[in-house]
Amino acid sequence: MSQQDRRKHPRYLLHLPVKLHRGEQELNAQVINASAGGCLLQMAEALAPGEVLEASLPQLKLPRTRLIVVRCSSTPTGYMVAMYFEATLADDAAIRHLSGDQLAFDKPPVVH
């Protein structure tokens, strides 16, 4: 069974800027894909699994919420960080609309 088949929510390709907050520190990232339960970010800084940050994603109709780091891997252009939304689920219809219904699968994202 593929990872996509095990997911609770469909994951869609996106390219949205997001600002994460680690206390008073602000970090810039790019949402690569997202679902109602979490997202994959591309960013310049590594984050530790279990680390908790805050962000607001108005494009996904998600108010300021806490995100928890699941994993972080190095890429030639920075880091890919998988996160899940602690409590509030993003709006699946908003994600689908922003992605143009472009589903993300188990293939690694193309990094530019």
Image: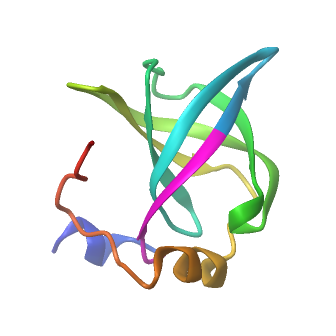
Q: As drawn, is 11 to the left or to the right of 93?
A: left
Horizontal and vertical percent position of residue 35: 51, 67
Horizontal and vertical percent position of residue 69: 51, 35
> Is residue 89 visible in this depiction of the protein?
no
User: Is the stretch drawn in magenta largely helix, strand or loop?
Assistant: strand
> Is residue 47 visible in this depiction of the protein?
yes
Q: As drawn, is 91 to the left or to the right of 106?
A: right
Q: Residue at x 56, y 74 (%)?
A: 98
Q: Is residue 16 magenta?
A: yes
* Nearer the observer, 107 or 76: 76
Horizontal and vertical percent position of residue 91: 69, 75
Q: Is residue 68 magenta?
A: no
The quarter of the rendered structure image containing the C terminus is top left
Residues rendered magenta in the picture? 9-18
Q: Is residue 50 above or below residue 65?
A: above
* Nearer the observer, 110 or 65: 110
Q: Residue at x 44, y 21 (%)?
A: 44
Q: As drawn, is 31 to the left or to the right of 11?
A: right
